[in-house]
């Protein structure tokens, strides 16, 4: 483990003073209800109270997963996503075409929860109905993390060869996004039937978040083309880093020039670009991925980390000059707490987790966006995101500290208390409204992520190797599924 040097986290004094003045003005005028946590609040009562036993919590989580799964089956079976309030369904990739996304997302969660009749029903559906040659422009990144990853995980869990075959067919049809690119940086979209590519300015998450799925497919098939394509995309971006070892946000596939710098790590849309470097090292032992992760992470910690009232946040900065561009923080970035710890920066990871836990102390469920400088909620939605509890899971696995179970349980209680509806679980349109204003969607990733992280923390599942297990950015079990 590499401890953070004090210099790495030293805030730049002039900038701080300016931010401090701005914060004072904003605080005086901000609507109190929209203010984000400034200082660590007292530990929430639920953190001090005794938790139910692990087995009880695992049963509760499994029951809630089943509740949402039954809701999906009842109203939207075979469609991508369910709208659990209206009982309608949602197409995720293409209007009027369905990939049964929630089924693919749920497959390995059903498996670790030992819902075997549902595993069979789902795998049968996929083998019969999932068409990897649809005539339509598919979002490559979403197809990789959700469908390719889901099929791989489903294959590893069940051993069914057809799932791997379908996975390979689909990936072969996605591959032109990489091979047609003059830089090796993938186009955003590809027509699965014709191979025509489009979308030439992907954000970084879309450029990097495929090496786990592609690399595993290379291992399982002995065909190195997938890993090489994914690694080539990483290399093309690393070659274009700034003199501060920072990266931009979106990049031009054809010219290799940066398009904008509007968002920096760990925020979207760059987030999992960093995650897959470290996870790629963990899964494949490729030292170049580890070294790239270290280089970029050192720069993020040195140039972007900001300590505020005992909490740790990350500034948005210009990659060339380090100049401050923003202080917004997306809930999607909460995954970074676990990643930092996994990558050797455990203290920083635990501190960043506490920053998000401080928000969980203030709000019944986490809002989508906050600005830590203005101390405001910038997006009051909640999209049933898994990133906070993803970090609970990572940090608990790494440290064994019960505090992560407590905060994960509190997160679970928040969801169960506010986002449960008769048709399953739904997103919220405004978590600050009283009563909370709900939306009408169970995103596909819900079936892959939130309940799985919770379940694997509390259930002693015989089907998951907690020590070796490795999950993708979409919560797919890419290593550590135990077949029994
Ligand atoms: C998921 O699709 C994945 O976790 C992805 O990496 C980013 N965000 C969503 C869920 O928030």
Image (cartoon, rainbow, N blue to C red):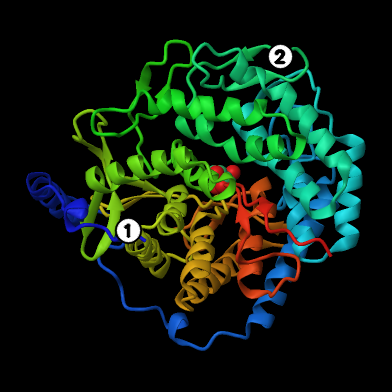
Taking depth in this image into account, of 217 and 274 the one nearest to the observer is 217
For the point 67% across and 33% down, the residue is: 143
For the point 56% across and 19% down, the residue is: 187
In the image, farthest residue toward the bottom: 50
Q: Which mark is residue 195?
A: 2
For the point 90% across and 54% down, the residue is: 120
364 shown above or below 60: above
The quadrant of the picture occupied by the N terminus is bottom left
User: Can you tell which quarter of the image residue 221 is in?
Assistant: top right
Q: Relative to residue 484, is residue 4 drawn left or right?
A: left
Taking depth in this image into account, of 80 and 127 the one nearest to the observer is 127
For the point 26% across and 50% down, the residue is: 305
Could you tell which of marks 2 and 1 lies nearer the N-terminus? 1
Q: Relative to residue 435, is residue 294 drawn left or right?
A: left
Cα separation, mark 2 vs mark 1, equals: 45 Å
Residue marked by disc 1? 2
The quadrant of the picture occupied by the C terminus is bottom right
Q: What is the secondary structure assignment of the residue under circle 2? A: loop
Does residue 423 appear anywhere in the picture? no
Instruction: Ligand 1: give its quadrant.
Output: top right
Which numbered mark, 2 or 1, is in the foreground of this view? 1
- Badge 2: how crowded within 10 Å, few (<14), some, or many (20+)? many
Does residue 360 appear anywhere in the picture? yes
Asked whether the beta carbons under mark 2 and mark 1 sit within 8 Å of each other, the answer is: no
Q: Which mark is residue 484?
A: none
Q: How many marks?
A: 2
User: Can you tell which quarter of the image residue 353 is in?
Assistant: bottom left
465 shown above or below 177: below
């Amino acid at each position: 483990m590499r401890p953070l040097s004090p210099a790495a986290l030293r805030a730049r004094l002039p900038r701080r003073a300016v931010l401090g003045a701005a914060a004072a003005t904003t605080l005086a005028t901000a609507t109190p209800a929209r203010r984000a946590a400034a200082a660590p609040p007292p530990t929430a009562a639920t953190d001090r109270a005794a938790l139910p036993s692990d087995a009880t919590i695992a049963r509760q989580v499994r029951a809630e997963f089943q509740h949402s799964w039954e809701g999906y089956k009842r109203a939207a079976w075979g469609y991508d996503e369910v709208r659990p309030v209206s009982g309608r369904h949602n197409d995720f990739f293409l209007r009027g075409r369905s990939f049964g996304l929630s089924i693919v997302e749920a497959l390995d969660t059903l498996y670790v929860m030992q819902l075997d009749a549902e595993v069979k029903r789902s795998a049968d559906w996929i083998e019969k109905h999932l068409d990897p040659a649809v005539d339509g422009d598919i979002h490559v990144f979403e197809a990789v993390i959700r469908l390719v990853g889901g099929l791989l995980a489903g294959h590893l869990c069940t051993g069914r060869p057809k799932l791997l075959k379908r996975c390979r067919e689909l990936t072969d049809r996605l591959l032109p996004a990489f091979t047609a690119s003059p830089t090796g940086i993938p186009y955003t979209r590809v027509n699965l039937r014709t191979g025509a590519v489009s979308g030439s300015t992907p954000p970084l998450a879309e450029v990097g978040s495929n090496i786990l799925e592609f690399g595993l497919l290379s291992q399982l098939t002995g065909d190195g083309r997938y890993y090489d394509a994914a690694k080539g995309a990483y290399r093309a971006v690393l070659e274009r880093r700034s003199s501060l070892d920072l990266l931009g946000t979106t990049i031009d596939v054809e010219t290799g020039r940066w398009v904008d710098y509007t968002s920096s790590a760990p925020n979207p849309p760059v987030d999992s670009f960093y995650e897959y470097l470290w996870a790629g090292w963990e899964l494949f032992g490729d030292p170049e991925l580890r070294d790239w992760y270290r280089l970029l992470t050192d720069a993020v910690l040195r140039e972007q980390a900001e300590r505020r009232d005992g909490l740790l946040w990350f500034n948005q900065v210009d990659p060339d000059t380090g100049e401050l561009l923003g202080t917004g923080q997306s809930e999607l970035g909460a995954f970074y707490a676990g990643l930092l710890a996994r990558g050797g920066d455990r203290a920083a990871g635990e501190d960043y987790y506490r920053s998000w836990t401080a928000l969980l102390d203030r709000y019944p469920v986490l809002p989508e966006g906050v600005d830590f400088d203005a101390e405001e909620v910038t997006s009051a939605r909640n999209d049933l995101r898994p990133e906070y509890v993803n970090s609970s899971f990572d940090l608990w696995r790494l440290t064994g500290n019960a505090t992560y179970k407590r905060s994960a349980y509190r997160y679970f209680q928040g969801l169960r208390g506010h986002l449960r509806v008769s048709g399953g679980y739904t997103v919220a349109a405004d978590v600050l409204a009283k009563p909370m204003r709900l939306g009408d969607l169970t995103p596909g990733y819900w079936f892959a992520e939130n309940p799985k992280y919770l379940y694997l923390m509390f259930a002693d599942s015989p089907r998951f190797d907690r020590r070796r297990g490795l999950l993708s950015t979409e919560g797919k079990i890419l290593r550590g599924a135990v077949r029994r």
